[in-house]
Image: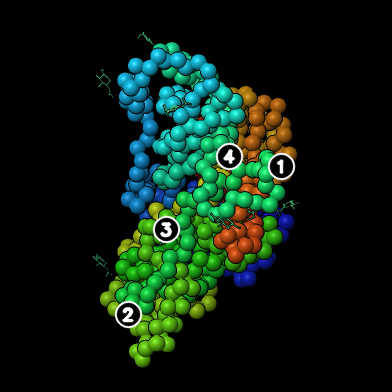
Amino acid sequence: MKEDSNLTEPIGQNLIKVISNVCFSVFVFAVLIVTVIAITYQPPDPWLESSPALTKLFTQFHNATFQNDNSVLKTGEDLPDFGIAETPAVAPAVMPITEAVIEEKEERVTNMSLKSDCDLAGPVNCSDPRVLIAVERFNLRFFKAIVFLEYQTPVRGSAPNECDVSWRFRNKKEKSWRKYRDFRRFRIGVGENCTYRVTGANGWHSGVNARRQRSRGNATRSGGGIGRIAPPVRDEEINDTIPLLGSEMTFRKGKYLYYSRGGDYCKGMNHFLWSFLCGLGEAQYLNRTFVMDLSICLAATYNPSNKDEEGKDFRYYFDFEHLKEVASIVEEGEFLRDWKKWDHSRKRKVPVRKVATYKVTPMQLSKDRSTIIWRQFDAPEPENYWYRVCEGQAAKYIQRPWHALWKSKRLMNIVTEISGRMDWDFDAVHVVRGEKAQNKELWPHLDSDTSPDALLAKLKEMVHPWRNLYIATNEPFYNYFDKLRSQYKVHLLDDYKELWGNTSDWYNETRLLNRGRPVEFDGYMRVAVDTEVLYRAKTRVETFYNLTKDCKDGINTC
Ligand SMILES: *[C@@H]1O[C@H](CO)[C@@H](O)[C@H](O)[C@H]1NC(C)=O
Ligand SMILES: *[C@@H]1O[C@H](CO)[C@@H](O)[C@H](O)[C@H]1NC(C)=O
Ligand SMILES: *[C@@H]1O[C@H](CO)[C@@H](O)[C@H](O)[C@H]1NC(C)=O
Ligand SMILES: *[C@@H]1O[C@H](CO)[C@@H](O)[C@H](O)[C@H]1NC(C)=O
Ligand SMILES: *[C@@H]1O[C@H](CO)[C@@H](O)[C@H](O)[C@H]1NC(C)=O
Ligand SMILES: *[C@@H]1O[C@H](CO)[C@@H](O)[C@H](O)[C@H]1NC(C)=O
Ligand SMILES: *[C@@H]1O[C@H](CO)[C@@H](O)[C@H](O)[C@H]1NC(C)=O
Ligand SMILES: *[C@@H]1O[C@H](CO)[C@@H](O)[C@H](O)[C@H]1NC(C)=O
Ligand SMILES: *[C@@H]1O[C@H](CO)[C@@H](O)[C@H](O)[C@H]1NC(C)=O
Ligand SMILES: *[C@@H]1O[C@H](CO)[C@@H](O)[C@H](O)[C@H]1NC(C)=O
């Protein structure tokens, strides 16, 4: 993982200020290691700790150096019993297809076809409802990890006894109700009593004839003709366009909370989220629309270039559509345009309350009727961090809306593709190496316990031979795990490069967000995908406590 860029350069060398060294592990499980003057500090698990405790932590350690475990990354959707149930906008609209549903359908079909002579010989009629019933039943038995939602009528495959079937599903491990699509090719045989049965099935996305044709646009292409490739399956369900404010009237009726860019810019992603959710939380507390800057500066540790990179779109990483649904937000550019328009067209300007310091609490602002409350973060670091607004007393009133934050559906499509290709039948091991493995003082055994030989020996106790084994890791050397290939079918993120390569949907779709320019698959995206695939494994082996007795947060912390 790209955090290892830290290995080659002293931490923070590229960062602008001393305090930039502060990295936050806010929701990563565990892990902030304060390496100041030999202090080892075990931070609270933010998902479990109260906000005052966290606030204390963050204020105490402003100028400390934090290192976090960037190799696992959690967002609202990964948290069991955390807020997800409160998001009615994404409640299931479609009933899952269960055995009971299939039986009922079968009964209906059988009643109808009793009169027919039940001659199933000859080419299979894929649109015969009995074919779909056979496929549904097969899928239900075979794919225990997913919930089947809707099937399309099967269509003919490449041979007379083949049918291509497409369906939508969701993953049981995912708390969100997002739906994904698969289409596979099935071989159909004749069963007993006037039924069909599935005699074979091909892999993920093999049923190309059932792939939904894109309706919009002109499919004709240069170089078309024979062997023309079916149009790509773009995820048409993503609608993360920037909402327009619309008329001046709507703008006038709104109440806004606007945060100027603060010292959080170009800090680690966890710092960004900790701050962003503070702002969003304040807006919710004040019943205001939060003005949101979708342009993110991704810190150097996640960038292959090892430099901070500006102009990253929030939507590369997070699900903006979901955010729009559950929170009141407006995009900064839209907002500023309307504000300016308003100020130009009227004598009386928009009422604005400027707030110069975070020391003005949200509670003090709750009575303010100004159209815009504008928090300016001009003070020197660390006085200019957004999250400071949520410190102290405010922490009692403001709740960070974690549930509003899901990972980008575009990244989740990659996750689904990887786990789908393994038919959701895989085990995974999380191998933390990188800086921690180098740091013998805090993790004396980690390096040796994650050496190829040690890994193999340990895994043999926990994972059956020749299983699919996905390795989520921050070890940058691809061949490091070769030894495991003698026992397992090893899968690494880089084996799936084409999913974000220049022929992928991801590439095309993110490019659209980036005014036609290609988007780099950066370290943060890698961690996001690695983490999610890891969570979908049947057996999950963790580095700490499974592979090594070293403590997650350094020596003597467990
Ligand atoms: C920052 O560091 C200095 C010197 O290391 C120390 O005196 C000071 O108390 C620290 N401040 C905080 C807020 O930790
Ligand atoms: C099928 O027919 C049986 C008897 O003919 C009847 O009891 C049953 O309700 C029917 N089922 C459906 C779904 O129509
Ligand atoms: C296939 O089955 C469908 C539905 O039962 C029926 O409408 C259609 O006529 C059948 N086609 C052929 C070629 O038998
Ligand atoms: C086929 O029908 C017979 C008689 O109705 C029944 O005994 C048998 O279990 C059925 N077979 C299947 C696979 O449903
Ligand atoms: C397809 O493209 C042709 C010419 O490029 C145009 O005349 C036609 O209207 C287009 N059809 C659709 C459905 O857009
Ligand atoms: C996308 O969502 C916006 C609201 O956020 C809506 O106005 C627009 O019509 C939607 N677009 C599509 C194609 O569904
Ligand atoms: C926000 O709205 C809720 C419900 O309408 C109300 O109870 C609460 O007092 C409002 N908060 C502020 C700060 O105006
Ligand atoms: C995609 O990348 C490959 C290798 O990096 C390059 O050879 C090819 O020209 C690229 N194709 C497009 C369409 O950019
Ligand atoms: C991506 O876009 C390019 C050009 O618009 C197109 O040729 C290519 O087929 C698209 N690929 C996918 C996977 O959508
Ligand atoms: C890993 O360790 C945890 C805690 O000791 C244990 O519950 C879990 O079963 C272990 N995982 C495996 C695959 O053995």
> At label 1, which amino acid type do we have?
Tyr
Check disc 1 and report the residue beneath it. Answer: 478
| Crowd tier of the residue under label 3, counting other residues whose Cα lies within 10 Å: few below 14, some 14–19, many 20 or above | some
Q: Position of residue 30 (x, y in %)?
A: 50, 49
Give the Cα distance between marks 2 and 4: 50 Å
Q: Nearer the viewer, residue 465 or 394?
A: 465
The kind of secondary structure element at disc 1 is: helix
Give the Cα distance between marks 2 and 3: 25 Å
> At label 4, which amino acid type do we have?
Ile
Residue at the (46%, 29%) spot, across then down: 127
Q: Is residue 260 visible?
A: yes
Q: Quadrant of ligand 7?
A: bottom left
Residue at the (40%, 68%) spot, across then down: 290
Which label belongs to residue 370?
2
Mark closest to the chain's N terminus, 1 or 3: 3
Residue at the (67%, 66%) spot, across then down: 14
Residue at the (69%, 36%) spot, across then down: 481
Mark closest to the chain's N terminus, 2 or 4: 2
Q: Nearer the viewer, residue 147 or 299?
A: 147
Q: Nearer the viewer, mark 1 or mark 3?
A: 3
| Crowd tier of the residue under label 4, counting other residues whose Cα lies within 10 Å: few below 14, some 14–19, many 20 or above | many
Q: Position of residue 216 (x, y in %)?
A: 52, 53
Which label belongs to residue 418?
4
